Image (cartoon, grey):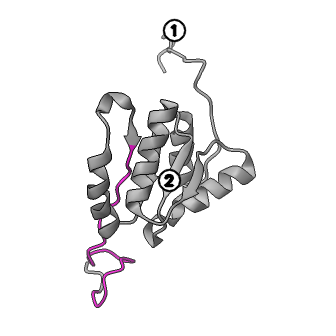
Amino acid sequence: MIEGQTVAFDPRWKEHGAEEWSDALVAAMKLGGVEHLFFVSGSEIAFYQESVAKAQERGWPAPRLITVPHEGVALNAALGDTMISGQPSATAVHVDVGTFNYGAALHSAPAPDRGPIRVPCQARATGRYSGCRSRGTRARS
């Protein structure tokens, strides 16, 4: 910092605990006004469950994780929650078919002025990277 330079400070900014990027992600959701994360379990998004559980144990900010059985239910629950509360909601589903199932639920979505929904998306595992789930494919260098 240059001596004598003033730095803008927003008193609403605070430091919050996080050990991994996923801890920061769920904290940012909560601090951004997301009270509920409607979640359809999948192996590539288990980090949401882990980070929310860790946050609850340590007193860190995190939305309430609500597990639902289908992506259409998740998105419609988030839409309804947002319309009633006026606050943003979030959903998380697994890749491929999970994202595809959102398509049908999007027809229920209200006009954008009724409130935001956060839909985080992951990249599809293609077999090109170490640790991906594609069968019969080895990581390539």
Pinpoint residue 27: horizontal percent, then vertical percent.
Answer: 57, 43
Q: Based on the picture, tell me whether residue 59 belongs to the magenta stretch.
A: no
Task: Kindly indicate the quadrant of the structure image that contains residue 44.
Answer: bottom left
Does 12 sit left or right of 108 as displayed?
A: right
Q: Earlier in the sequence, mark 1 or mark 2?
A: 1
Residue corresponding to mark 1: 4
**x and y percentages locating residue 61 in the rendered image:** 64, 41
Q: Is residue 52 above or below residue 130?
A: above
Magenta-drawn segment = 118-137
What element does badge 2 sit on?
A: strand
| Figure check: 103 above or below 8 | below
Q: Does the stretch in magenta take in 130?
A: yes
Label 1 packing within 10 angstroms: few (<14), some (14-19), many (20+): few
Residue type at the position of mark 2: Phe
Residue drawn 73% across the image and 45% down it:
59
**Quadrant location of residue 60?**
top right
Q: Is residue 37 visible?
A: yes
User: Quick check: 14 above or below 45?
Assistant: above
Q: Is residue 97 left or right of residue 63?
A: left
Mark 1 touches mark 2? (CB < 8 Å): no
- Give the percent coordinates (x, y) of residue 6: 50, 10
Which residue corresponds to mark 2? 38
Can you give x and y, in whole percent of width and height, for residue 116 in the image?
38, 35
Of the two numbered discs 1 and 2 in the rendering, the one whose residue sits closer to the viewer:
2
Tag 1, which secondary structure?
loop
Q: CA distance from mark 1 to mark 2?
A: 48 Å
Answer with left or right where residue 30 lies relative to residue 54: left
